[in-house]
Image: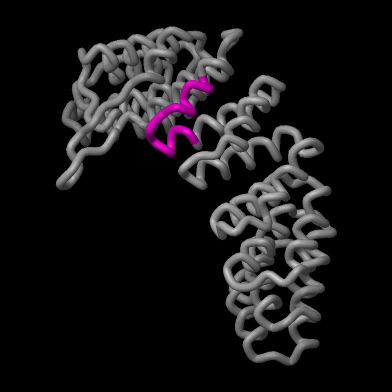
Amino acid sequence: MAKRDDGLEGKLARLRALERESPPTAVDEIAKLLEDKSPFVAARAAEVAEQLAMTSLGEPLLATLRRVLDGQQADTGCRVAAAVLGALAKLEVEAADEYLRAMKLVRRERHGTGYVDSAIPVRLRAAEALATSRRATAVLDIVTLFGDEESEVRAGAAAVLGMFRADAALAALYAKLLSWDASPDVLGACMAALARADSARFVPVVATYLDSEDDTLAELAAVALGDSRAAAALPLLRATIERGTRGRRQSTLLLAVSLLRTDGALDYLIEVVRRGAEPAAIAALQALRIHAELPSLGERVREAVEARRSKKLSQAFRAGFDRAT
């Protein structure tokens, strides 16, 4: 019997095998590897536990999280903490105290000539894990992340709050949107969460940002409306497009229409290809590319392009659709 390689590469290879074969020994082996001194091995063990939905590893995962938070287990780059929290959230392990503690973790590590906070993913995954718990005050706990100095954390908190779809969470998101934020990404995350969670109430609110003087904010509002998949978003996006937008903003609005993925949205984009000004028609073609695999769509778009007799449109069609067929 060949001796197992206990080095880094050997352990990672063993984890790949456990993930692929899931033998009876897998739980015990992964539990052991969660304690490994290499952050790469321990983090990968947590990822395998998540992917294989190993609910029996809840306690070993929690023990690992406690060790890394206490500084008793190496965790360069916070790889282990982030991976373990991802697994705990997926397995819906109840551990509110540990999640609250992880939400406060800040770890500045050298990166190049400066320092970065490597605990950003930890705070976000801890919030996601808390959202899966039965903690009554979870919304209030997660709202505190709106005060985080890192915009990535504030934006992530908005996405997590959107998972609740409860009035308290929506109120917090709406208040954050109205009170502003230095980062457009945070405002965009609030808009996206609101539009998805309650399209009837918040699609009209998000649409008011389509005419913002800030191009980035207007484009984030458009994408939030597209991602909402709400039927009410199409006429609002169309009206904005037809008021005469140009350039990148126009392209983003047309992409947002495409993201709605409704028959009406696709019909509108094909009509823009057929009758719109050439720049708009090309932008509509590019927006339709995400649906290039849909049966019959390519033929409908081809007919619209051929009717235009435009060399630029024909080139754009070949680039987006001929390669997909």
* Residue 323, quarter of picture: bottom right
152 drawn magenta: yes
Q: Is residue 300 left or right of residue 315?
A: right
Q: Is residue 53 visible?
A: no
Of 148 and 106, the residue lying toward us: 148
Confirm whether the magenta stretch covers residue 267. Answer: no
Residue under the point 79% across and 60% down: 265
Quick check: can you spot residue 122?
A: yes
Kindly identify the residue that appears in the image at 42 percent across and 30 percent down.
19
Q: Nearer the viewer, residue 135 or 24?
A: 135
**Residue 235 location (% of width, % of height):** 83, 57
Image quadrant of residue 162?
Answer: top right
Residue at 67%, 20% (x, y): give it: 168
Q: Is residue 299 left or right of residue 151?
A: right
Does residue 147 sit above or below 29 in this rendering?
below
Q: Label the magenta part by its dominant secondary structure.
A: helix
- The structure residue drawn at horizontal position 34% and vertical position 15%, both measured from the top left corner, is 65
Instruction: Please say if 319 is above or below 294.
Output: below
Stretch in magenta? 142-154
* Screen quadrant of the N terminus: top left
Residue 125: where, in percent of width, then height?
Answer: 45, 26
> Which percent across, then down, holds residue 207?
72, 50
Tell how many labels: 0
Position of 270 with respect to 227 (left or right) is: right
Query: Quarter-wise, where is residue 11 in the image?
Result: top left
Residue 52 placement, left or right of 195 = left
Vertical order, 322 against 51 (above or below): below
Query: Residue 303: x percent and y percent?
Result: 80, 81
Of the 4 image quadrants, the one containing the C terminus is bottom right
